[in-house]
Image: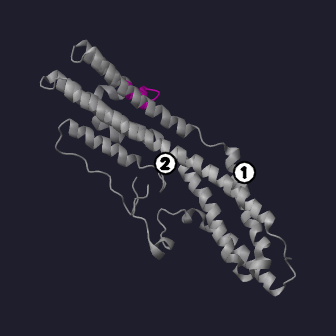
Amino acid sequence: MIIRDNPHSLRLFFIIRGSVLPLVYLRIIFITLLGAGVALVQHFYPATFPSFTLAPVALFGVALSLFLGFRNNASYDRWWEGRKQWGKLIVASRSLSRKMVSYVDGTQKQGAEMQRYVINLIIAFSHALRHQLRSTDPWPDITPYMAQNDIQFLRDAQSLTDGILRLIGAKLGECRRQNLISDFLMLKMDEHMTAMADVQASCERIQNTPLPFAYMLLVQRTAYLYCFILPFAIVASQGLVTPLFSAIIAYTFFGLDALSEELEEPFGVSANDLPLHAMSRTIEINLLDILGEKTLPNPIQAHNHRLE
């Protein structure tokens, strides 16, 4: 995710990092060159492209704008839903950890071990979910927080994140059987576990249910078609400035399309995706602090205005 102050004045025209320009500049160049070619032909041979009303082109552009706007809104809704779910995970993780430390007697060795075991698993869950959504290797991040006899169980589990939740539930059940927590407190802790499972399922739903391919194809084809015919439609009235107008329109339509593609998959590693690494590190720092650890990992900082 891009983290920077809003640019002012002419600076906004020269910002590349965080812009969709690197994704669409080849298409813009093609449309600009096409516009330049059409403009030169019209300049030297004025009768090549006759003048006609721009009403059909204007209506075409309005329809395309509505399509792109709808797709952009749908993609942003997915991005924002993903951010809300990870905010929910941060709350549930902090709340469950706080209850473990507050209500399980940590003055006894057994209670202290229970606290550390469960809170470490919650940290492991946040890292495991991030790696699951990004299809990366989770073990370097979660192994330091796992009991050695749990690693093989999790390697054999169909879902790593679900396996971690089962381990947390089993340990809380053990706490209840040993009367370390009451029935009422057990119910409240289970609600936090359910919230964590809900976040997992919601993120999987977002990841596994993209926008309909046919709709994406329709929008992209229409954008290409419109930008291709635009120079021929306006060259009679705009003359040698046709390439400029063609480039601006191409940047707008192709840029909106590219931005929608990035926001549609909010858990990736592109510039405008969610900073899952920073959020899972926040959970890690908060929970280790709840445990009373003095040496805490450093927060993830933005590098070149980009937070991952």
Image vertical order of residue 183 relative to residue 5, above or below: above
Mark 2, secondary structure of its residue: loop
In this image, 147 relative to 191: left or right?
A: left
Residue farthest to the left? 107
| Helix, strand or loop under label 1 | helix
| Residue that carries the numbered disc 2 in the rendered image | 268
Q: What span is in magenta?
A: 154-165
> How far across and how far down the image is residue 113, in percent?
20, 26
- Tell me whether the residue at label 1 lies in contact with that at label 2, contact meaning CB atoms closer than 8 angstroms: no
Q: As drawn, is 274 to the left or to the right of 116?
A: right
Q: Amino acid at mark 1?
A: Leu
In the rendered image, residue 226, in percent from the top left (x then y), is placed at 74, 63
Between the C-alphas of marks 1 and 2, the distance is 24 Å
Instruction: Give me the residue at 63% from left, 53% from top.
Output: 69
Instruction: Give left or right: position of 5 versus 226.
Output: left
The image quadrant of residue 160 is: top left
Packing grade of label 1 (10 A; few <14, some 14-19, many >=20) is: few
Name the residue located 36 percent from the left edge and 45 percent from the top edge.
279
- In the image, residue 223 lies at what x, y percent? 70, 59
Residue closer to the observer: 195 or 32: 195
Percent x, y of residue 291: 20, 35
Is 103 placed above or below 289 here?
above
Which residue position holds label 1?
218
